[in-house]
Amino acid sequence: MPIEIAELTQAERFQPVGHDGVGPVHLFGGERYEGAVTVALSHYLPGGRADLSPVPAETLYVVLSGTLVLTDEDGSAHTLNTLDSARLTEGTLRGVENPTNLPASMLVIRPNQAGRATGASEARS
């Protein structure tokens, strides 16, 4: 099997439902992506947020730069700084917010369930 390269210049932009002030791109993912795992790079502007909602599958977050706050269904806040990570199981309710005056970036990694079932995927970050 050949090595598949994902160049940032070729990444596909998308806009997940319930996200405001977030600029995500698929590094591996998108409509025609058939791989087993999706990887999105999400840039959160100051004040950017993702509404409290369930993750569709087990999801890993890795903060690459800045600070992001994850909020769970009972309102507990978890601050993630550069190179901190979080694992969320399928169905976990979470909100994400950048409470700072600097941008933050995060990798979002999850199984490509839609791609295996239909050959297409739509990711939430």
Image: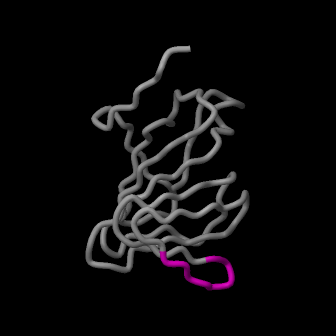
| Image mark count | 0
Residue shown at 66%/63% (left/top)?
Answer: 54
Q: Please check the rendered image and state whether residue 43 is part of the magenta-colored stretch, yes or no.
A: no
Residue shown at 68%/53% (left/top)?
Answer: 58
Quarter assignment of residue 89: bottom right
Quarter assignment of residue 12: top left
Question: How is the model colour-coded?
Answer: one colour
Residue shown at 63%/77% (left/top)?
Answer: 72
Which x, y percent locates residue 71?
57, 77
Which x, y percent locates residue 45?
31, 67
Q: Nearer the viewer, residue 100 or 56?
A: 100
As displayed, is residue 79 above or below residue 91? below
Which portion, as a residue range, is magenta? 72-79
As displayed, is residue 23 above or below residue 86? above
Which x, y percent locates residue 99?
38, 80
Single out the residue that lies furthest toward the front: 83
As displayed, is residue 89 above or below residue 100? above
Instruction: Describe residue 67's horizontal placement relative to residue 72 as left or right.
Output: left
